[in-house]
Amino acid sequence: MRIYRYAVLTRASHWVWFVAFFVLVGSGLQIFNASPNLDASDKSNPARRVLAIGSPAEGVGTTTLFGHAFVTTGWLGWTGDGMGSHGAHAFGATITIPGYQDLASGRRWHLFFAWIAAVCWLAWLVSSAVKGNLREMILRPSDLPKLWPMQAYYLKLRKTPPPHGIYNPLQKAAYTAVLFVIAPFVVLTGLALSPGIDAIANPLTIVLGGRQFARLWHFAGMLLLIGFFAVHVFQVLTQGVVNQMRSMITGWYETP
Amino acid sequence: MKRRLFLASAVSALTGCGPIGSALNQNAGVRRTLESVEGLNHLLIGTRGLAREYGEGDVDRNFRVNGFATPSDARYNALLAENFSTYRLVVDGAVARPQAFNLARLERMARQTQITRHDCVEGWSAIGKWSGVPLGIVLDAVGPRADARYVVFRCMDNDGAGNLYYESLDMHQARHPQTLLALRLNDAPLDADHGAPVRLRVPTQLGYKSAKWIARIEVVGSFATIYGGRGGYWEDEGYEWYAGI
């Protein structure tokens, strides 16, 4: 049976976020490259360095995590510049925006698409709340006992999924976490990096542990979003890719 | 064939953000669109609130040098060699009483010490103890006229290609209580790397707004005709004029 699963604004938001996500990650890595260290502190402090990506010598790239150094030549620290040669850039030209080193442009892309993603989120939230679609999506306490049965179904330890509405309990958990916890967290940690915001909302930066710590949180938030994206794409590919893609484009979903 | 094209474009979409972004980045219309949010950020964040002030224990004794180190400029090095004894800070433009301040006079006007964090656009931060003259006091001394909207800082340095280093602030940011003409860093007169003899401190914006080696402060109605017309050396290179974010 075909059901109309996604409202037009949900589908539009989904694809706007898809584009914005790539641009924000790419431009964010460009910005990161300008100072490829993350410190768990307010001001820069090598004694509290969590991550450092560098090039200690020509042709060598290293990634140092909590003081443990790994050689990552070609992947991190010493990477391709997109023009056939390699250089001392933390992240390579194939994934940064723009590809070549250009902090000013990276910031322009990042701040513009941050607005796009945030405005889209607000429009989606208001419209979904008005239409009552959020009820179907937000994880509730009553969903908690169904989380493991659903996971068991995915692992083929169970023949049928537990009874659920439009979204299964694991989907609800993932979407609730991304849209209402991780995304706002990434926005807040990004804002806390800015001296102008810090002057207005001092406690925000302090609660996060200071400016450099906010930078670390912002990066960690990005990693969580990338993790979600990877699982999300895996699910789409394994749970009926044509049906899934069609439903996110036309709205119509074929129920199994 | 179609399938192969699809696969090829999917692969390049996943690994090709950089090259695609590079191409779009050169497009004038794209750039104008990207730059459109700067005004919005300025409007919403603006110059509100105060930068956090720290204690003596937080100060970085070896404060990291931002931007360029000691200028190669001949005039600057001549002044440096004679310890700035003939240095004059010229303050003119759209003001009632244009003046030239020597260092002794600026020292007498100094009345603020702030321990604030310098946030570099590159991402790093350092904390310094800065002392000097609040810019508002210097502006009061020269009396900006009614048509004054911006304060432009011309520095004794160039990038080697003939472009002078300069910066600008609007009147609101110029009169912010923490906007400081710094003469001292960490209880010692500024050294050449850190902007001697006079530099700006704007702790509520990113570090590149805090111009070093200031020779002249010009009050203007518009900076559109000065150098690249975007209000600063780094701004002419593509960085935001409003650097609160």
Image (cartoon, coloured by chain):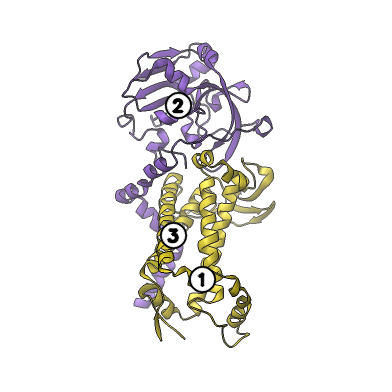
- Same chain under badges 3 and 2? The reply is no
Q: Amino acid at mark 1?
A: His
Apparent side of residue B61 relative to residue B42 in the rendered image (left or right)? right
Chain that is yellow in the image? A
Residue B153 coordinates in the image, percent (x, y): 42, 25
Q: Amino acid at mark 3?
A: Trp
Residue B39 coordinates in the image, percent (x, y): 37, 42
Q: Judge depth for marks 2 and 1 and give the one in front.
A: 2
Label of residue B90 in the image: none
Residue B70 coordinates in the image, percent (x, y): 52, 27
Which residue is label 2 attached to? Answer: B175
Which residue is label 3 attached to? Answer: A121
| Depth order, front residue of B47/A213 | B47
Which residue is label 1 attached to? Answer: A232
Which residue sits at x=57%, y=87%?
Answer: A160
Apparent side of residue B213 relative to residue A207 in the rendered image (left or right)? left
| Depth order, front residue of B227/B153 | B153
Question: Element under label 2?
Answer: loop
Question: Element under label 3?
Answer: helix
Chain that is purple in the image? B
Q: Amino acid at mark 2?
A: Arg
Residue B135 coordinates in the image, percent (x, y): 47, 23
Determine crowd level at label 3: few under 14, some 14-19, many 20+ residues with C-alpha closer than 10 A.
Answer: many
Which residue sits at x=56%, y=60%?
Answer: A223
Which residue sits at x=60%, y=33%?
Answer: B53
Question: Where A255 falls versus B152 (above or below)?
Answer: below
